[in-house]
Amino acid sequence: MSENVHLNSQFTNSSGISNKNDGDVVIQDDLTEMLSIVPEDVREKISKHAHRSKLLEIVLDLGRQPEARFSGMEDVKKQSETLRDDVVTQEELDHAERVVGEFGGDNRAGVTGTLHRISCIRNRSGKIIGLTCRVGRAVTGHVDMIADVLNRDNGESVLFLGKPGVGKTTVIREIARVLSDDLQKRVVIIDTSNEIGGDGDIPHPAIGSARRMQVPNPSEQHKVMIEAVENHTPEIIIVDEIGTEMEALACRTIAERGVQLIGTAHGRLLENLIKNPTLSDLVGGVTTVTLGDDEARSRGCQKTISERAAPATFPIVVEMHARSMWVEHDVEVSVDDILVGNRPVVNLRTRDEEKRVQVFPCVYDMDLVANESLDEQESSSNGNFRANPQPGFAVSKTTSGRDVSELTRIGEYNNNNSRSNNNRRGGSSNNSRYGGGTSIDDPYAWAQSLGQIPDKDALNALLFENNTMNGKKQKKIKKNLGAR
């Protein structure tokens, strides 16, 4: 794992596709179709806008000035722009509603034959008083970041994790095309809001030959997922925005039937899933286990510990922090390490100056850069995301570009918290692989506290057997048991 892996795209592009300056390839954005919804003066300004290619969405709120929002702008102040002085009127919103047509149960609609998403805001009586017109673009090039994983024969399920707007839907749309057209897989997309395959009965060409099943109501997504497996013999199911317990259960059911899953969920870090009681089953879940005295002694840990409850539904989780900065987890290894307070080793996926994909192992420390701007990280010239592991070390860098030696300090923490450095796979400290010592200001203290529950049964039994001892000794025993 110590050598860089260079991934070159092996997927061919369709005819008529033009290259962008950033190395991605745009099939089409159909922006003219979406602009038919907005007022004429707004339409004209957007059509001639210098940053039209970076348009993210147009916001129309009753009684406010129409606003355009852009992505990928270097100047933060230019990410939002007022399009005119006059405010949006109810007549303009009514016109947009007539053009769009009927909104679904999730208050979303689309423009037939395009990937655009129109979302509405209603007042208490159900009248539309606001619209968010989100631009949908079919983009190729993102799939290169994970091409080697898609080509594996083991058919492991992959979950993309990221905050809203980071590009999860765009990625799985391209994955659907590559898997169905280039790799000749039987792919079925569960399209809850017609956001992956576009609006209308005929799917958008961006998904290739993948089949698309629409969902009549968002609350029924899990039922359509099961129906797809039972009725249409897919090899791969693609589902966007897994967010409920029933959907998580449907994912596990599908995975247990031998069908590969490609999905997305909201969240920034793997820890978000571990701590989310609704979605934790996607990564195996967390259970509290009480060990016997001998077992706890052999592991060098407390009697009550937290462990992964089951095999992960998604063996691979990819954190999408930016367009060219992904973190790939071997889920079961990462979850096990995190629950015992260790930092797992992950694959950092980035692009070099020539837009080639690089994959190399790093120590996971995204918690240390949580307050740093991702734009600053991507554009920084200090090589944070392009550092090569040093010869002679299995892993020398962290996901934030820090040297592993910066994560160590004196052995005081190790002496006071030795139980957290012995995991259930043998009791050795994983941190020792990274150059010795333990992490600074342990970021996974929350995981250790999951199991710090007093053993009440042992406490009651001991106090019952020793009911004649004095009060001071009872307090001492109670304190010791509660701290285990």
Image: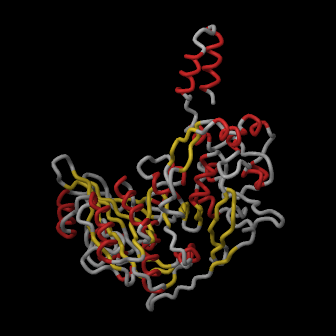
**Residue plotted at (17% across, 67% down):** 98
Residue 100 % position (x, y): 22, 69
Q: Residue at x 58, y 53 (%)?
A: 335
View extreme (front): residue: 465
Report if residue 232 is visible in the image: yes
Whether residue 140 sits left or right of residue 395 in the image: it is: left
Residue 165 as seen in the image, left or right of residue 6: left
Q: Position of residue 243 (x, y in %)?
A: 38, 55
> Is 239 positioned to the left or the right of 142 in the image?
left
Q: Residue at x 62, y 82 (%)?
A: 8
For image coordinates 80% across by 40% down, the residue present is 411
Nearer to the camera, 482 or 95: 482
Q: Is residue 223 above or below residue 279?
A: below
Scheme by which the image is coloured: secondary structure
Near-viewer residue (132 or 270): 270
From the top left corner, tell me how far across and down residue 173 is, in percent.
Answer: 42, 74
Q: Quadrant of the C terminus?
A: top right
Identify the image quadrant of residue 416: top right
- Indicate the quadrant where residue 177 lies: bottom left
For residue 124, above or below residue 94:
above
Q: How many marks?
A: 0
Is residue 22 at least partly visible in the picture? no
Viewport quadrant of the N terminus: bottom right
* Picture layout, residue 250 above or below residue 424: below
